[in-house]
Every structure is written in structure tokens, then in C-alpha cells.
Image (cartoon, grey):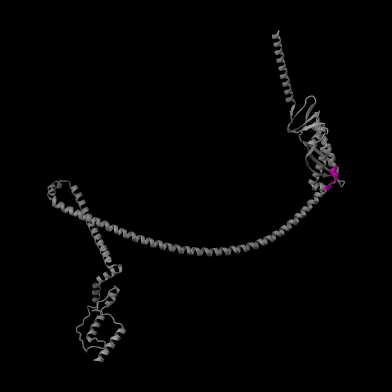
């Protein structure tokens, strides 16, 4: 019995658990099904049991734009208002203006349900359940009335010229009425404005004529300004041309001066380059001669060595040469001719080589002698003086040749004793003969030398001579 009760209790517990799970699942399903999301192009209107506002005022519906909300089952329901803009064509005709002139104002208005919280409440109360066409007709009636009202308060000139003011007045009046039914004005587009009396056309013609006259006046004024400007431009052009020519002449003169200066610098550089080139050529020529002399020296040494070897060969191997003489004569004539030709060529080369060595030795010895002479004299000038002194004999011989053909058969000298200067007539005669010879003293002076005192005594200054004469006179008086 106890087991039966226990099994019954377990069964009841399982049933209860299943029921609880089903209830919870149903509750979750209901919650998920009643939680509604609002698209961005719609307004979700929740109606039924709606809680009052925070200030305690009553609400007939709750409007949500975007987001989501939970819809209580049985006590609440929901629907959507479409936010699609509505384009309404308003072909207003014979609207009476402030001047009592009837005009036609065709226009296109674009309206839509407003998303402002207060205006959405009006839309939920007045437009809920209506189709878009019905909403469009409702808005059209409101626009017609307000448009006639705005035109009746404005003159045609204002309507035609100041479109911004006209559109602002329309927007202000029309939008105020549309808000009452939950709509808002999005855009207003006036296509054209006309009247039956042709007043607007006349205004257009008047404006066109005025514009044409103003344009003509502007053209004449611009032509006048253009003529003045052209004259000023020509004057400025002449001034600019004169200034440009002046600057051009100044620039040409400056350029010519720079060209002349550049040519002078070029000539100077060419002269310096020519000087360096000539110096380099002289240096290279001197080096070439030096190398030639060295080559000649080496050739001469080689020739001496070969001659020495030849002499040794003549002395040492004379018997061997005699022994091989018979064999050499037996060789072919062609070989003899070849050897003779080669021997002649070697002889000519040896002769020329010997001559080159001789020239090289001569020049080398002269250079060495000159170097020793400069070293012995101390300076190059003193060496030149020594060389001139060495050649004086030849120079004197050349001068003597000039008078050697003079014939003097007889020379008679009358001796009268000493003259006033203490010299005898014979001494004066010999001195005069010496003076008749070529001026050796000048020749010696040019060479930096002095004549011997025996031939050319030193000249005595006048004061010293007068002193000596005074001494001689005093000696005579003493005697």
C-alpha cells in the first residue's frame, strides 16, 4: 500500500512539473509574441488601456517612433502610421490678391506625418486608420484654404519678386494648420505664377525694358571706361617701353663691359697657360736631353764592354776561330750574305752608338765642368766672369787685329824733362799710345775684372791731386 502511494506521489509530482514548464513556456511565448519593434519609417500607435502621462493627463494612445514596446494581451493593441512623404499637386486658379487681381498659382506641396511627440498624438487621434490617398486629400483641402488666404494678404509685386517672403508666409500658415491633424510641411515648389489681365507680363516687360536701358547705360559707361582705360594703357605702354628700352640699353652696356672684362681675363688666362705650356715644354725638353744623355752614356759603356770582350776573344780564342774557319766557308752563300749583312748592320749600329756615346760624354763632361766651375766660383755670375776672363786672350787678339795693319816707320821723342804733373814727355807719349788701343779697361769692367796697375793705373781724385801739387810746391819752397 505504501509503495502504491509513493508511486502515485511521484507521478503527481512529475505531472505538476510538466504543467509548470508548459505554463512558463507559454508565458515566454506570449512575451516574445507581444514584444513589438517599430521600424524607422513608421510610427507605432498603441491603444487600449494606456497609463496616463506623468502630469496625470489622459492619453488616448501611445506613439512610438523607433525602438520597441510590450503590448499587453487582451487590454492593448497596436497599429502603424506610415511616414512616407506625400506629394500633393495644388493647381490654384483665380486666387484674389491684395490688389483684387486674380492670379493662378500652380504649386506642389510635400507633406508627411510628423515625428514630434505632440504632433504624433494628433496624427494618432485623427489619421489612424486612413489610407495615404485619404490623408493626401485632407491635406490638399487645408493647403487650398491657407494658400488663398496668404495670396489675399500680399501684392502681386511681392509675390512675383520676393518669392522667399511668399514661400515663408505659405509655410507659416499652411504648416500651422497641418500640425492640427498631425502633418508637417516638408517642401513647397511654385511652378509658375500668371494672371488673366496680363499684369505680371506687363511687369515683366517693364522690368525687361528697364534692364535693357540699364544695360545700354552700363555698356556706354563701360565703353567710356574702356576708352579711358585704353588711353591710359597706351600711355603706360609707352612709358613701360621707354623704361624697358632704357634698361635694355643699360643692360647691353653692362653686358658689353662684362664681355670686355671676360675677354681680358681670357687673354690673361691664355697668356698664363701659354707661359706654363712653354715652361713645361722646356722642362720636358731638358728631361728628354737628360734621358738621351743617359742613354748615350749606357750605350758607350756597353760599347766599351763589347770592345773589351772582342779583344779578349781575339787573344784567347784565335786558334778556335782558325779551326772553325774551314767549316764556316763551307756554309751556304746565302748564309754568308746574311751574316755579312748582319755584320754591316751591327757595324753601322755600333758606329752610331759610339758617336752617340761620344756626344753624350762630351755634353756630360761639359755639364760636369760647368757645375764644378759654378761650385768653385760660388755663384753663377762669378762663374760667368771666370769664363769671360778665360776668353780675354781671344778678345784682345780680336781687338789687336783691328790695328795690326797700321804701319809706323819711325817714332821720335823729344825729352824736355818733367811737366807740371811730374810726367816726362816719353811717359805721356806711351800713355797716349795706350789710349789709342781699344778700351781694354771697359772690356774688363764689363767682365767684372780690373786691368793690372802697370797698364791702367788707378785714377786719382781731383782733391787728392791738388793736395799733392800743394805738397810739391811747399817742398820746392823749402828747398
**Is residue 262 in sight in this rendering?**
yes
> Which of 152 and 231 lies nearest the eye of the viewer?
152
Q: Residue at x 68, y 60 (%)?
A: 229
Q: Residue at x 27, y 58 (%)?
A: 293
> Which of 37 and 255 lies nearest the eye of the viewer?
37
Instruction: Say above or below: 65 vs 220.
Output: above
Q: Quadrant of the N terminus?
A: top right
Q: Is residue 265 left or right of residue 116?
A: left
State the residue lying farthest toward the front. Answer: 2
Indicate the position of residue 382 as horizontal and vertical percent values: 29, 69
Q: Quadrant of the C terminus?
A: bottom left
**Is residue 136 in sight in this rendering?**
no
Q: Is residue 217 left or right of residue 196?
A: left
Considering the whole magenta stretch, tell me its main secondary structure.
helix
- The boundaries of the magenta stretch are 149-156
Q: Residue at x 23, y 74 (%)?
A: 397
Q: Is residue 49 left or right of residue 386?
A: right
Indicate the position of residue 433 as horizontal and vertical percent values: 24, 82
Total number of numbered labels? Answer: 0
> Which of 308 and 219 lies nearest the eye of the viewer?
308
* Quadrant hosting residue 167: top right
- Magenta highlight on residue 247: no
Q: Residue at x 30, y 86 (%)?
A: 467
> Which of 468 and 88 lies nearest the eye of the viewer?
468
Indicate the position of residue 79 as horizontal and vertical percent values: 78, 29
Indicate the position of residue 158 as horizontal and vertical percent values: 82, 48
Instruction: Say above or below: 367 vs 392.
Output: above
Amino acid at each position: 500500500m505504501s509503495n502504491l502511494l509513493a508511486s502515485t506521489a511521484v507521478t503527481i509530482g512529475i505531472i505538476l512539473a510538466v504543467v509548470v514548464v508548459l505554463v512558463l513556456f507559454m508565458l515566454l511565448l506570449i512575451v516574445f509574441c507581444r514584444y513589438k519593434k517599430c521600424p524607422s519609417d513608421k510610427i507605432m500607435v498603441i491603444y487600449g488601456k494606456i497609463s496616463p502621462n506623468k502630469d496625470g493627463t489622459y492619453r488616448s494612445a501611445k506613439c512610438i517612433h523607433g525602438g520597441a514596446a510590450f503590448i499587453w494581451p487582451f487590454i492593448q493593441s497596436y497599429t502603424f502610421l506610415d511616414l512616407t512623404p506625400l506629394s500633393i499637386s495644388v493647381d490654384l486658379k483665380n486666387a484674389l490678391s491684395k490688389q483684387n487681381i486674380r492670379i493662378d498659382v500652380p504649386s506642389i506641396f510635400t507633406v508627411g506625418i510628423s515625428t514630434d511627440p505632440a504632433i504624433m498624438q494628433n496624427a494618432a487621434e485623427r489619421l489612424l486608420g486612413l489610407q495615404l490617398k485619404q490623408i493626401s486629400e485632407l491635406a490638399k483641402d487645408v493647403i487650398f484654404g491657407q494658400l488663398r488666404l496668404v495670396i489675399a494678404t500680399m501684392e502681386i509685386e511681392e509675390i512675383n519678386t520676393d518669392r522667399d517672403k511668399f514661400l515663408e508666409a505659405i509655410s507659416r500658415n499652411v504648416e500651422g494648420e497641418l500640425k492640427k491633424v498631425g502633418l508637417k510641411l516638408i517642401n513647397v515648389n511654385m511652378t509658375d505664377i500668371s494672371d488673366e489681365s496680363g499684369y505680371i507680363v506687363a511687369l515683366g516687360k517693364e522690368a525687361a525694358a528697364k534692364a535693357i536701358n540699364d544695360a545700354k547705360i552700363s555698356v556706354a559707361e563701360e565703353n567710356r571706361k574702356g576708352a579711358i582705360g585704353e588711353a591710359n594703357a597706351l600711355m603706360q605702354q609707352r612709358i613701360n617701353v621707354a623704361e624697358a628700352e632704357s634698361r635694355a640699353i643699360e643692360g647691353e652696356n653692362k653686358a658689353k663691359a662684362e664681355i670686355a672684362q671676360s675677354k681680358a681675363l681670357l687673354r690673361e688666362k691664355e697668356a698664363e697657360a701659354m707661359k706654363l705650356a712653354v715652361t713645361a715644354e722646356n722642362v720636358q725638353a731638358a728631361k728628354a736631353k737628360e734621358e738621351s744623355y743617359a742613354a748615350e752614356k749606357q750605350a758607350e759603356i756597353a760599347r766599351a764592354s763589347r770592345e773589351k770582350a772582342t779583344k779578349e776573344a781575339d787573344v784567347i780564342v784565335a786558334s778556335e776561330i782558325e779551326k772553325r774557319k774551314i767549316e764556316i766557308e763551307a756554309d751556304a752563300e746565302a748564309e754568308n750574305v746574311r751574316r755579312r749583312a748582319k755584320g754591316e748592320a751591327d757595324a753601322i749600329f755600333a758606329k752610331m752608338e759610339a758617336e752617340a756615346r761620344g756626344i753624350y760624354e762630351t755634353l756630360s763632361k761639359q755639364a760636369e765642368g760647368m757645375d764644378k766651375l759654378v761650385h768653385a766660383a760660388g755663384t753663377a755670375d762669378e762663374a760667368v766672369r771666370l769664363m769671360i776672363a778665360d776668353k780675354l786672350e781671344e778678345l784682345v787678339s780680336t781687338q789687336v787685329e783691328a790695328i795690326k795693319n797700321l804701319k809706323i816707320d819711325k817714332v821720335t821723342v823729344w825729352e824736355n824733362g818733367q811737366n807740371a804733373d811730374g810726367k816726362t814727355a816719353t811717359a805721356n807719349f806711351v800713355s797716349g799710345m795706350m789710349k789709342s788701343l781699344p778700351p781694354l779697361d771697359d772690356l774688363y769692367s764689363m767682365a767684372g775684372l780690373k786691368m793690372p796697375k802697370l797698364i791702367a793705373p788707378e785714377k786719382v781724385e781731383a782733391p787728392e791731386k791738388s793736395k799733392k801739387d800743394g805738397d810739391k810746391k811747399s817742398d820746392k819752397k823749402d828747398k
